[in-house]
Image (cartoon, helix red, strand yellow):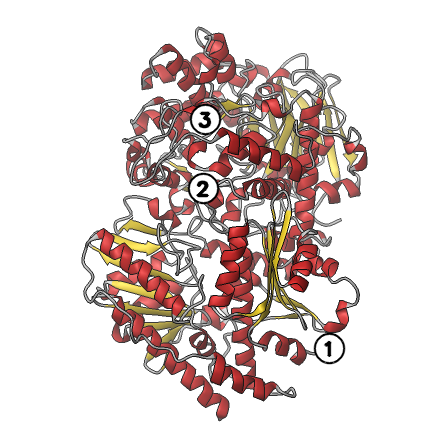
């Protein structure tokens, strides 16, 4: 258990989602272990001991966006409701506690909230996320809340602007210091991927690591595939993109075997994209600015459709990349992405993420995803300034 | 009251009376329904012999039944198993549960023993005990057909009538109340069938909240490759697991002597679709429709059944396997226990049965004739009688299903901690160890598994009490089902409160078992798993289990559960402290 705690503290540091020195993870097998920042470790342990779950992450996020969302929320509000797909599907909403709710021992109240939700934001403390059966699950839930609050805060800024003292300055600091230039420079790719199984597996594993190392995706979100003759090699469901060794399923294109039942939920979309485009590889991630920008629509006020994320029939455009609606898995995305992705080699799904293609290898897919995210990033800051 | 009806039909077959009684609201809130409610209602009876006339046979639905909550048109049947001697419950789908709720009932509590074979007929507010007449001795299909005018039917076949220790109660639509021999308990009461007709509507406290929660569940189903993925169970049924288990080298083969069967592709999901024209069927109102039927409407076998009549007995002929499944359904035999018992018998005598012999032996089991007189007692008793007790691949006398414990260490632990014996569904670690839901765990590690199994047992006890289908939890979680339950009943529930209920149910069951003499000595895997490796291949080694590490994790599990090192309770007054 301790090795798992060390591993995920390391991941929180590596992906820069939490502040060094303000991270703790608790886990319980037959005994309770809590490691990390002493104050947070105590809180994590006290909270987890009240839950019928295995692990809990308590950490102060590296960005103040979750705090700002609480401060910007109206009096009487007790949760935030991000509109991105990850939240809508897996978190539903994110409860929060204000400073004034924290009189005395906060653990019982935290345990109560975590009794119904995967993550909670606590003003002045950070994000507390629970993992029902693994430490990794607590990390994933922390990461999901971080992702959701990032997306919602930046979305809200576009509509409501800065409201709080110090908010603008903090945002500028985020823009200049936290955000890193996104590029594919210095990365090595196989130019034209062969049909060799070992080469394909190694290349998928390597590209998976690149996406995480370059900050293109959070470690958990996304999937990767390569088509090789009668097989599609695709990352498994719930596989971290930076740890794909042993987590890639070979799936026959004719469905003659069901071994790929553990493949990514987007297998159907990948298969249809291969059929439609003849591409060799597909990369799918949830880069944050693309997610944010995909939810902007200037026709929302006059449009009768309210469930835009699944019902919108239109193909919009973001810098030459088509944007379509559609739920994940068997929910519609697999119908709407394949027809539109071929021309540009990329497509964005409303509130969800980006698919990119490589005709020969992952270099093209990776660079295209970088370009899409960079465009969305620039476009976001242009809009905010406007 | 929303969700529940608050009514129990008390049926005394000895006196021939049926009486509607109230169920205390606090009991419903504390045990929900299904398994939990049935287990609670066993509190005054759990020490009785399974065949004692006073032993109850309890059919209980849940608070979500009767609403369009996904996968919730199910019931649990609870009693004490004649095969294992443990408390026993089994969840089953079909239309029966829906109609039972429609008749205004949460529970049918059958006690006593009739002097002659009877049928219990429920029609709305009315309930009567009818002479079974010529139905006694008939197969399941004929019995169901004869009673179909009375609504939904659940019935026993010859196996239940003749006291086969793994006799099922068969639901009219092809589902079954399986494994632990509750069909024999029903047969012991001379109760051939129960029919039910009901049109009542289950009230929902907050319709808007309910619709939102239902949408959340459905979104998660669509996001789950195991459920609605193109290779998932909605498409291929549970035989979708055949190829996966072969690839993972954990498909029990020839009585668990090996873990890979080279011909398993003959009965894989795609093969069944191609050869049998499999079409979708399923439980009433279930969006998944994982059951598969042939073009003629014949129920097709599940994963466990194809593996056990296939690899476990060295049979590769799909049509022979389908025939064995159909025969078991008609005779009212549990397919897993029947096939595993044949396999143990086969290894003991040095020859596994061929397809023709399988058909004959299954029939002999149900009618208790020839070899069937021994085989009808299950693999443990068969192996002991043949002087080879180590050949029964069972835990607490319940035959192991089709996941070799050497290939998934959480599964190994869960087999022994299960309160109903060697069952995969109590903690269902295959979900995370193999299917990666909700998150993957390392199948070849014991690390953390004691806690994981404990939590999962609690979760699934709650799921079995809702009563929802476990397959729903390849996508959704108690978070969404807690929301559904709160919306339906108007009582607030969430994942933690539901797990607390599950824990209460689990501990009650374990307490009953311990009171009946069960302890660590029964939390035992067959010796083979510690001494023989499985089949290596594709870079995967399947070594024997590390006994010391296994025992260490079992002790951890006891500590987490608050049990003594012997796996029993220090506190003899546990039940008095529970609602």
Measured in 3D between alpha carbons, the distance from the residue under mark 1 to the one under mark 2, in whole angstroms, is: 48 Å
Residue position marked by numbered label 1 in the rendering: A75
Specify the subunit that label 3 lies on.
B
Indicate the position of residue B179 as horizontal and vertical percent values: 53, 26
Disc ID at residue B530: 3
Relative image position of residue B235 (x, y in whole percent) = 38, 46
* Mark 2 or mark 3, earlier in chain: 2
Are marks 1 and 3 in one subunit?
no
Q: Is residue B98 above or below residue A94?
A: above
Determine which quarter of the picture holds residue A214.
bottom left
Pick whichever, B42 or B176, lies toward us.
Answer: B42
Location of residue B100 (image quadrant): top right
**How many residues crowd around disc 2 within 10 Å: few (fewer than 14), some, or many (20 or more)?**
many
Residue found 38% across the figure and 53% down from its top: A236
Image quadrant where residue A157 sits: bottom right
Does label 3 lie on the same chain as label 2? yes
Residue B223 is at least partly visible in this image: yes
- Per the image, the residue denoted by label 2 is B443
Q: Quadrant of the C terminus of chain B?
A: top right
Q: Name the secondary structure under disc 2.
A: loop
How far is disc 2 from disc 3 in space, using C-alphas? 16 Å
Tell whether A82 sits left or right of A315: right
Comparing B149 with B505, the one in front is B505
On screen, residue B154 versus residue B391, left or right, reads: right
Q: CA distance from mark 1 to mark 3?
A: 61 Å
Left or right of residue B230, residue A24 in this image: right
- B168 relative to B498, above or below: above
> On what subunit does the disc labeled 2 rest?
B
Q: Chain of mark 1?
A: A
Q: Position of residue A188 (x, y in %)?
A: 26, 68
Label for residue A224?
A: none
Q: Element under label 3?
A: helix
């Amino acid at each position: 258990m301790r090795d798992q705690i060390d591993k995920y503290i390391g991941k929180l540091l590596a992906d820069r989602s939490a502040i060094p020195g303000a991270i703790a993870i608790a886990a319980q097998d037959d005994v309770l272990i809590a490691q990390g920042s002493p104050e947070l470790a105590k809180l994590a342990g006290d909270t987890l001991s009240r839950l019928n779950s295995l692990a809990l992450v308590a950490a102060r996020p590296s960005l103040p966006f979750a705090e700002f969302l609480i401060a910007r929320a109206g009096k009487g509000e007790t949760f935030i409701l991000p509109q991105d797909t990850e939240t809508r599907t897996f978190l539903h909403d994110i409860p929060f506690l204000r400073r004034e709710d924290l009189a005395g021992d906060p653990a019982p109240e935290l345990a109560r909230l975590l009794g119904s939700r995967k993550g909670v934001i606590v003003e002045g403390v950070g994000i507390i996320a629970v993992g029902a059966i693994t430490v990794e699950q607590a990390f994933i839930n922390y990461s999901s809340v971080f992702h959701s609050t990032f997306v919602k805060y930046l979305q809200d800024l576009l509509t409501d602007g800065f409201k709080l003292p110090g908010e603008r300055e903090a945002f500028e600091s985020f823009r200049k210091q936290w955000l890193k230039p996104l590029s594919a420079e210095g990365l090595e790719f196989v130019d034209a991927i062969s049909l060799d199984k070992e080469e394909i597996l190694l290349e998928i594993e390597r590209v998976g690591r690149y996406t995480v190392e370059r900050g293109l995706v959070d470690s958990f979100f996304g999937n990767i595939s390569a088509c090789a003759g009668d097989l599609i090699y695709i990352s498994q469901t719930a596989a971290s993109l930076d740890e794909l060794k042993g987590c890639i399923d070979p799936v026959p294109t004719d469905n003659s075997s069901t071994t790929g039942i553990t493949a990514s939920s987007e297998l159907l979309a990948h298969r249809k994209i291969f059929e439609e485009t003849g591409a060799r590889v597909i990369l799918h991630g949830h880069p944050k600015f693309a997610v944010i920008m995909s939810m902007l629509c200037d026709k929302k006020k006059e449009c009768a459709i309210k469930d835009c994320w699944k019902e919108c029939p239109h193909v919009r455009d973001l810098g030459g990349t088509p944007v379509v609606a559609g739920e994940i898995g068997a929910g519609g995305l697999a119908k709407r992405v394949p027809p539109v992705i071929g021309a540009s080699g990329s497509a964005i799904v409303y509130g969800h993420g980006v698919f990119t293609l490589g005709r020969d290898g992952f270099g093209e897919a990776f660079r295209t995803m970088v370009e899409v995210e960079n465009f969305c990033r620039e476009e976001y800051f242009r809009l905010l300034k406007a | 009251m929303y969700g529940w009806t608050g009514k129990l039909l008390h049926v005394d077959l000895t006196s021939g009376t049926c009486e509607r009684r109230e169920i205390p609201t606090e009991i419903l809130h504390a045990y929900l329904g299904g398994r939990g409610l049935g287990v609670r209602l066993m509190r005054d009876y759990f020490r009785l012999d399974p065949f004692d006339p006073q032993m109850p046979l309890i059919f209980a639905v849940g608070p979500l039944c009767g609403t369009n909550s996904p996968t919730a048109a199910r019931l649990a049947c609870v009693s004490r198993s004649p095969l294992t001697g443990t408390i026993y419950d089994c969840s089953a789908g079909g239309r029966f549960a829906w109609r039972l709720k429609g008749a205004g009932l949460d529970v049918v509590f059958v006690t006593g023993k009739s002097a002659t074979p009877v049928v219990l007929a429920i029609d709305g507010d009315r309930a009567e005990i009818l002479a079974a007449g010529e139905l006694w001795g008939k197969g399941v299909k004929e019995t169901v057909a004869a009673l179909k005018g009375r609504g939904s039917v659940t019935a026993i076949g010859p196996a239940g009538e003749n006291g086969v220790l793994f006799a099922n109660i068969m639901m009219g639509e092809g589902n079954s109340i399986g494994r632990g021999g509750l069909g024999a308990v029903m047969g012991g009461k001379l109760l051939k069938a129960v029919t039910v007709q009901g049109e009542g509507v289950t009230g929902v406290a907050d319709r808007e909240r309910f619709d939102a929660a239902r949408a959340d569940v459905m979104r998660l189903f669509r996001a789950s490759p195991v459920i609605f993925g193109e290779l998932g169970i909605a498409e291929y049924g549970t035989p979708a697991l055949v190829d996966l288990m072969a690839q993972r080298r954990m498909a029990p083969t020839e009585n668990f002597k090996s873990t890979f069967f080279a011909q398993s592709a003959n009965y894989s999901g795609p093969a069944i679709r191609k050869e049998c024209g499999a079409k979708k069927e399923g439980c009433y109102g279930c969006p998944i429709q994982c059951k598969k039927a042939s073009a003629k409407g014949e129920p097709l076998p599940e994963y466990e059944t194809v593996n056990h009549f296939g690899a476990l007995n060295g049979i590769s002929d799909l049509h022979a396997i389908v025939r064995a499944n159909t025969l078991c359904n008609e005779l009212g035999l549990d397919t897993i226990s029947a096939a595993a018992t044949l396999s143990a018998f086969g290894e003991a005598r040095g020859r596994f049965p061929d397809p023709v012999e399988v058909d004959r032996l299954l029939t002999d089991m149900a009618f208790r004739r020839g070899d069937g007189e021994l085989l009808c007692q299950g693999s443990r008793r068969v192996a002991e009688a043949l002087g080879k007790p180590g050949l029964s691949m069972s835990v607490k006398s319940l035959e192991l299903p089709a996941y070799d414990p050497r290939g998934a260490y959480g599964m190994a632990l869960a087999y022994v901690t299960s309160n109903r014996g060697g069952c995969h569904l109590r903690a269902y670690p295959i979900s995370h160890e193999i299917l990666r839901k909700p998150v993957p765990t390392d199948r070849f590690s014991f690390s953390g598994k004691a806690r994981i199994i404990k939590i999962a047992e609690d979760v699934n006890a709650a799921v079995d009490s809702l009563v929802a289908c476990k397959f729903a939890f390849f996508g959704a979680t108690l978070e969404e089902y807690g929301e559904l339950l709160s919306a339906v009943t108007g009582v607030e529930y969430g994942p933690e409160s539901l797990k607390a209920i599950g824990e209460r149910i689990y501990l009650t069951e374990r307490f009953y078992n311990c009171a009946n003499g069960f302890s660590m000595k029964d939390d035992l895997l067959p010796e083979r798993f510690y001494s023989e490796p499985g089949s290596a291949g594709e870079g995967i080694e399947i070594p024997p289990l590390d006994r010391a590490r296994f025992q260490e994790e079992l002790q951890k599990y006891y500590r987490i559960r608050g049990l003594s090192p012997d796996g029993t309770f220090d506190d003899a007054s546990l039940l008095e402290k529970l609602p």
